[in-house]
Amino acid sequence: MPRWLPRAMVLALALIACFQLGSWAFHQLIGLLINMLIAFFLALAVEPAVSRMADRGMRRGLATFLVFFAVLIVSAGFVVMLGSMLASQIIEMVDSFPQYLDSVINWINDTFRTELSRVAVQDSLLHSDWLQRYVQNSATGVLDISTTVLGGLFRLLTIFLFSFYFAADGPRLRRALCSVLPPARQSEVLRAWEIAVVKTGGYLYSRGLMALISGAAHYVLLEILRVPYAPALAIWVGLVSQFIPTIGTYLAGALPMLIAFTVDPWYAVWVLGFVVFYQQFENYMLQPKLTAKTVDIHPAVAFGSVIAGTALLGAVGALIAIPAVATLQAFLGAYVKRYDVMDDPRVHGRRTRDSVPLLRQIRRVLGTDTRTDPHTETRTDTSTRTDTDTRTDDDQPPQP
C-alpha cells in the first residue's frame, strides 16, 4: 500500500465529517440566518432617516432608538385599534347570529317547501360529532397556540435587536468589512451598500405611497356604504395589500367584506367588486409608474422575483425579493457592456418591406404555394411571349 493512501483516506474522512457538521449547523441556524436577513433589510430601510438625524448632530444610537420607537408606537396603535374593532364586531355578530339564522331558515322553507326550525337546527349542531371533535382539538391545541405566539414574539424581538445594531453601528460595520478587503474591493462594497440603501428605501417609499392611495380609495367606498370602522378598515387594507405581495389585496379585502356583510349582504358584493377593480388598476396603471420611479424594475421582473423569493424563503422571501433584485440589477448594471442599437424596423417590432411572411415561406418549402412572386411572374410571361413570337415567325411561309 502506498504511504500517501492512509493520509488521503484520513483527509477524505475529515472533509466528509466537516461537510456533515457544516450542513447540520446550517439547518439548525437557518431560522437565525433568516431573522438576520430581515433585520439587515430593515436596517437598510431606516438608514436614510437615521443618517439624516445623525448629520444634524444627534448621536447615531439615539437617532436609531427614536426611529424604531416611532415605528413601534405606530404598529402597536394600529394593532390595538384593529383588535378592539374586531372584538366589538365579533360580539355584535354573535348577538345578531339568531336573526341571521332565522332569515336563512325562512328563506330555505319558502324556497324548498321545508319545515325547518331554529331549535332543531341548533340541537343538531350542538349534538353533532364534528363539533365535539372540534372543541376537543381546540382545547388540546391551546398550548400549541400559546407556544407559537411566544415564539413569534421572541422572533420579532430578535429581528428588532439585530436591526437596531445594524442601523446604529452601520459605519462601524462597513469599516470592519472594508478593513479585510483591498482598496478596489472596498469601493465596490461601499457602492453596493449605497445602492442597497437607495433601493430598499425607494421600495418602502413606493409601497407606503401605494398603501396611502389604496387606503384613501377604500375609505371613500366604505364611507359611501356606511360601513362601521371605515378608517381602521381602510388602514388595514392599505397596509396588508401592499406589504403582502401578489395576494395581499384579496386577503385585505376579506375583512371589509365581512364587516359590510353584517350591514347588508349586497354591500359585501360591492366591496368585492371594488377590490377586484382596484387591484387591476393598481397592477396596470399605478404600480408600474411608481415602481419605475423608485425601484426602477420591470413589473414582470418584480412579479417573478416575488414568486422566486416565496419559493426560497416563504413570506420573508416575498417581502425582500423586490429590493434584493433591484439592488442586484443596479449593481451588476455597471459591469454590463452595452452597445448602440442599429436603426432597423425589426427593433421597433415592425416588419421590413422585403420580408416574406413565415407561413408563405413554409408553403414555398412544401411546394403548396400557388402564388408566385410578381417579378418571377413578369419574367415568365415575357419569356413565354418571346417563345410564342419566335415559333410564329418560323412557321410562316417565306415571302416571295
Image (cartoon, grey):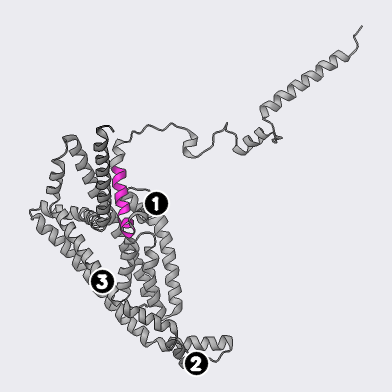
Q: Residues within 10 Å of mark 1 (few under 14, many from 20)?
A: some
- Which segment did they paint magenta? 314-330
Q: Residue at x 37, y 73 (%)?
A: 256
Pinpoint residue 101: horizontal percent, then vertical percent: 45, 87
Q: Residue 10, relative to residue 167: is it above or below?
A: above
Asked whether residue 315 is drawn in magenta, I would say yes
Dot 1 or dot 2, earlier in sequence? 2
Q: Is residue 340 visible?
A: yes
Q: Can you identify the residue that label 1 sits on? A: 304
Q: CA distance from mark 1 to mark 2?
A: 53 Å
Secondary element at image label 3: helix
Q: Can you identify the residue that label 2 sits on? A: 117
Secondary element at image label 2: loop
Q: CA distance from mark 1 to mark 3?
A: 35 Å
Pinpoint residue 295: horizontal percent, then vertical percent: 31, 50
Q: Relative to the observer, which residue lies in front, 248 or 344?
A: 248
* Marks 2 and 3 in Cβ contact (< 8 Å): no
Q: Is residue 381 left or right of residue 304?
A: right
Q: Image quadrant for the N terminus?
A: top left
Q: Can you identify the residue that label 3 sits on? A: 147
Main secondary-structure element of the magenta-colored stretch: helix
Looking at numbered disc 3 in the image, what kind of residue is underneath it?
Thr
